[in-house]
Amino acid sequence: MPLLAERARATPGKPAAIFPDTGEVLRFAELDARANQAAHGLIALGLVPGEGIALLLENTPEFLILSYGAKRAGLMVTPLSIHLRPPEVAHVLRDSGARLLVAGASLGALAAALDLEGVPHRFSAGGAIPGYRPLAALLEGQPTQWPEGERPIGREFLYSSGTTGLPKGIRRPLIPFADRLKPEFDMSWKPFYGFDENTVYLSPAPLYHAAPNRYVQRTIDHGGTAVIMRKFDAARALALIEAHRVTHSQWVPTMFVRLLALPEEVRRRRDLSSHRCAIHAAAPCPIPVKRAMIAWWGPILREYYAGSEGIGTTFIDSETWLRKPGSVGRPAYGRVHICDEEGRELPPGETGRIWFEGGARFAYHNDPEKTAAAYNDKGWATLHDLGWLDEEGFLYLSDRRADLILSGGVNIYPAEIEAVLAQHPRVSEAAVIGVPDPEFGERPRALIVPRGGAGDAALAEELIALCRANLAGPKVPRAVEFLEELPRSEAGKLLRRVLKERYL
């Protein structure tokens, strides 16, 4: 946290964050001063270290000001997804114990629908919301210096995207004041990506999601500049890379699909020569999509596999991926093990649950049972994803255990079928779910977003034939349906639970 203060003294007039959709710029000195005002305002309300605030904001300067300020006051910061339904937001507010909510006026309808019992302080940013005080009342007139005393440093108190149920919180202890200059997370990512004071980082994703939130703040803490889009638009993103000479960026596979769907003229129009590192994660990237992106942008893609829980991380660069297509790399933090359901370690090539050894410990807030289920008797931790290792120790993802299809006693991994479907030139996106079957329990069904027009019976037959030629019989979808889009979280993760609800 104090890294920002050091940057403000060294380069006060340098842009820390640029918001190109509104033309707003936060320079280092201004961000530092306004964060201090936020810290003083929160302390004046009587909030004490360890208590929390929640942010229901789009990508705006206030998001960064309040995040930095709250942590300087020793508070926990919980960003709220603007795509959650009111009951889900209410759950996070209750579960986190947030004492203050700041909502953007553009989200006034959602803010007005919330049950705010137990949240005594409510402020609106960017306009009025009935029942909320203007944010200026919290900030104006407050000192611009760091708060007095050796208060501990707060943290983000992040919640999962809720792909398989209600969001779950991951709370870590406050940082002692004496450790304020130490890195908050492991530093294995830094040499892999090459962040420094010359970094210009494009964030096309919402700041309330863990990865863009952390990487924007890492950019600022290293003295670089973050260019923060209000909302992802493929053509606009390319224009911003050219206009701001972007060096680094972060994406999810859905964004790659939309970038590749742009007309060739639009794709080739922009000068992307400054762009040297394109980070991606959050969801498995179809092999044809990643190959096409590397062919277009060059070998600048850097993929990682991790989770908000912080139990371990794997990395893979483009050159290695081209040799190991589909892999998410080898561990840079923690050691990977693959185990069956009885806890026995499996040899290379066999699919099982992915466990990390040697990573940081964590706990799901208010859920000791879920926390206990994330650890085994050896102290290894899991995100409940399934995968396998090759002979060289490279990890390949299969699916989450909750997505596994059990058909006539056979384990079927949707990701394997989706990878085959993605090879067809008329498939833009593919999802496979298990639907009830009276004979086999479940059967796989393919849900397809077609490219270049609507799907038809002929395309469905082609897709089933493609699967039949590449997969064992039980894995071949018994039906294909065509959709205009697949439900995804703002992090790009496929919301299978939404698809399954249609058939259960």
Image (cartoon, rainbow, N blue to C red):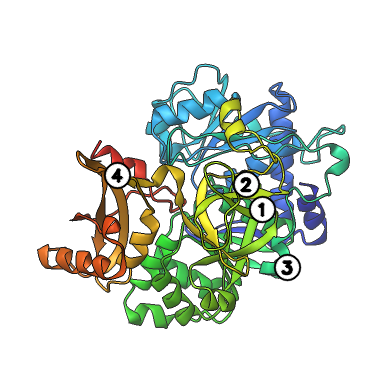
The residue drawn where x is 68% and y is 68% is 192
**Where is residue 297 drawn, in percent x and y?**
50, 79
Instruction: Give the labeled residue for mark 1.
Output: 217
**Where is residue 364 drawn, in percent x and y?**
60, 33
Distance from disc 2 to disc 1, alpha carbons, whole Å, reads 8 Å
The answer to whether 332 is drawn above or below residue 403 in the figure is below
Q: Secondary structure at mark 1?
A: helix
In the drawing, does residue 110 fall left or right of residue 356? left
Instruction: Give the labeled residue for mark 3.
Output: 191
Q: Earlier in the sequence, mark 2 or mark 3?
A: 2
In front here: 131 or 189? 189
**Where is residue 359 drawn, in percent x and y?**
71, 48
Asked whether disc 2 touches disc 1, contact meaning CB atoms under 8 Å apart, the reply is yes
Distance from disc 1 to disc 3, alpha carbons, whole Å, reads 17 Å
Q: Residue furthest left?
A: 457
The residue drawn where x is 72% and y is 44% is 360
Query: What number is the disc on residue 64?
Result: 2
